[in-house]
Amino acid sequence: MVRKRFPDLPTGIQWAKVLKKVGLGREDWYFWKQVGKALLCTYALFGAAWVYNETSPLGWWTLKPRPKEEKELAHLYERRQFPYPGDKEAMEEFVAKGGMIGTTIGPKGTVDTDKDAFNYQKELQNKKFEQEAHKLWFRMRNEVIAELQEKGFDVE
């Protein structure tokens, strides 16, 4: 009589059975391949839309919603062209025209091409002088009105 022997029981975790139960067995590879393709195409589509939105060649059509005020005033604004920083002559000309004043986008017509840096400084000084003159005038006027009111005159 031949003695029957039982097979040795496997020890540890049997990964093939575990993976099969969670849906990662050999027969599930085709499904996961399709899921991977779908995700890749979706990410590629969203990435292309994002890049197109940031660098739209049309300029007037992006996916960003614009507020009503911006739509109404869009015709007043233009994009300034900045010179290359290494080009000293172009940078000096740009600064002399007042190009460094304000933001990169400003209303049309505010930058006068005949102004240079010296004239702009002069204009700023004149504005400051006018403001100080107005302050001084109002202070003196108020003092005179206060003195007249103290003496009994009806002054408004």
Image (tube, helix red, strand yellow):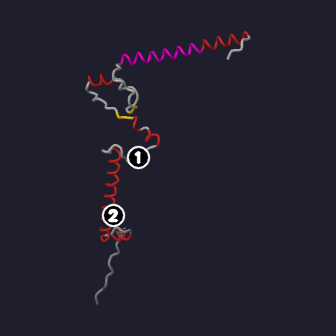
The residue lying toward the viewer, choosing from 145 and 42, is 145
Mark 2 or 1 closer to N-term?
A: 2
Question: Looking at the picture, which amino acid does disc 2 mark?
Answer: Val
The answer to which image quadrant residue 140 occupies is top right
Quarter occupied by the C terminus: top right
Q: Name the residue rendered at 53%, 13% in the picture.
A: 133
Disc ID at residue 39: none
Q: Which residue is mark 1?
A: 64
Q: Nearer the viewer, residue 59 or 92?
A: 59
Q: Which residues are magenta?
A: 117-138
User: x and y percent of residue 110 in the render?
Assistant: 39, 27
Q: Is residue 52 or residue 112 the one in the foreground?
A: 112
> Label 2: which residue?
35
Q: CA distance from mark 2 to mark 1?
A: 30 Å
SS at mark 2 in the image: helix
Is residue 58 covered in magenta?
A: no
**In the rendered view, would you say 42 is above or below 153?**
below
Q: Main secondary structure of the magenta part?
A: helix
